[in-house]
Image (cartoon, rainbow, N blue to C red):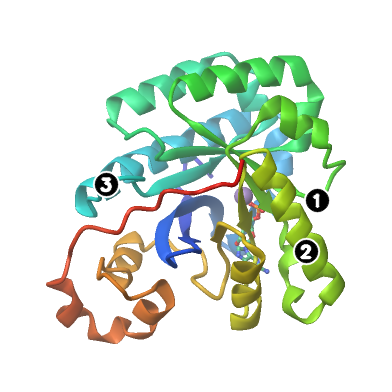
């Protein structure tokens, strides 16, 4: 698929909740299969993980996403917190030393501003070899990448890992998020979980937000970021997303999306974004 140019990188926007502004994107890989159509990673990544193909696949996504991460801050300049791209890293990739070189190279060559490359890792990846993983991740952080712990709540979800790894972000699996607005116990649970993460200085991302009610609940519970179909399905058309989110003060992401038909009017209003400093109670 790589050789035949059938691998696509899609992007899903991530919204910073306090201001409801566009904050960045998650890069998601798809295989455009000639017969089966656009295939999700669950249907081919495990196979790629059985061989070194996953390393090539991972590099491909990284190499595609990094220039985008470098381009956005130029097109949407703002004083602080540039738009970021969040890229998945598999265990095979991380335990090969040249990932560090690769990331250093990418961060250098594309002049990707600090804070605009995030690496998504899972707990199971770290647990394969906790000491080595922690060491490598520390290097990567030193090179300028930020860490997001993905799929939190699915595995053992060890609190000790949070302490040892100190990820910048934790992403709560959509299993917990979907329908939270109608479930008082889950609301309470997630609210406590957000508090715990904030004690560690970790920002919280809710995945899989599909309804206005869940969006509002996540905001009320103190989540820092959301992503999900409500905002936007993953897409290859980045310029389209960027045109849907012109930088107009006082208009939030969903309002912008609803007004997207009136693009030409908004295009003239490009201004600096309000800053997005995260104020975590430590
Ligand atoms: O493993 P990870 O948590 O990164 O999962 C990302 C996957 O979730 C992607 O394949 C993406 O298409 C999918 N996804 C993103 N937003 C939503 C959503 O709102 N609902 C559902 N069902 N899936 C989503
Ligand atoms: Mn992810």
Residue 72 in view here: yes
Label number found at residue 153:
1
Label 3 – label 2 distance at C-alpha: 33 Å
Q: Quadrant of residue 93?
A: top right
Label 2 – label 1 distance at C-alpha: 8 Å
Considering the numbered disc 1 on the image, is that residue within a helix, a strand or a loop?
Answer: loop
Residue denoted by label 2: 176
Residue 125 in view here: no
Percent of width and height locating residue 15: 47, 62
Q: Is residue 90 left or right of residue 73?
A: right
**First of labels 1, 3 by sequence position:** 3
Mark 1 neighbour class, 10 Å CA radius: few under 14, some 14 to 19, many 20 or more? some
Label number found at residue 73:
3
Mark 2 neighbour class, 10 Å CA radius: few under 14, some 14 to 19, many 20 or more? some
Percent of width and height locating residue 115: 41, 37
Percent of width and height locating residue 254: 43, 77
Residue sitting nearer the eye, 173 or 223: 223
* Whether residue 279 is situated above or below residue 160 in the rendered picture: below
Label 1 – label 3 distance at C-alpha: 33 Å
**First of labels 3, 2 by sequence position:** 3
Q: Are marks 2 and 1 in contact (CB under 8 Å)?
A: yes
* Residue at figure coordinates x 44%, y 68% from the top left: 20
**First of labels 2, 1 by sequence position:** 1
């Amino acid at each position: 698929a790589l050789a035949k140019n059938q691998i696509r990188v899609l992007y899903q926007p991530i919204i910073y909740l306090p201001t409801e502004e566009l904050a960045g994107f998650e890069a998601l890989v798809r295989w455009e299969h000639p017969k089966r159509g656009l295939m999700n990673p669950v249907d081919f990544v495990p196979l790629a993980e059985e061989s070194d193909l996953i390393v090539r696949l991972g590099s491909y996504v990284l190499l595609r996403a990094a220039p985008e991460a470098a381009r956005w801050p130029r097109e949407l300049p703002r004083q602080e917190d540039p738009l970021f791209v969040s890229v998945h890293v598999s265990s095979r990739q991380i335990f090969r030393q040249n990932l560090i070189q690769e990331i250093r190279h990418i961060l250098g060559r594309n002049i990707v501003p600090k804070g605009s490359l995030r690496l998504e890792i899972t707990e199971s990846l770290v647990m394969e070899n906790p000491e080595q993983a922690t060491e490598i991740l520390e290097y990567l952080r030193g090179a300028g990448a930020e860490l997001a712990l993905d799929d939190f709540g699915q595995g053992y979800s060890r609190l000790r890992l949070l302490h040892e790894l100190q990820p910048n972000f934790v992403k709560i699996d959509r299993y917990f998020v979907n329908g939270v607005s109608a479930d008082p116990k889950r609301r309470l649970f997630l609210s406590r979980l957000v508090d715990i993460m904030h004690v560690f200085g970790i920002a919280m991302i809710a995945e899989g937000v599909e309804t206005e009610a869940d969006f509002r609940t996540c905001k009320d519970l103190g989540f820092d970021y959301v992503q999900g179909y409500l905002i936007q399905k993953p897409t290859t058309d980045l310029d389209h997303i960027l045109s849907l989110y012109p930088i107009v003060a006082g208009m939030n992401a969903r309002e912008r999306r609803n007004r997207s038909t009136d693009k030409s009017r908004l295009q003239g209003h490009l201004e600096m974004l309000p800053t997005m400093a995260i104020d975590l109670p430590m």
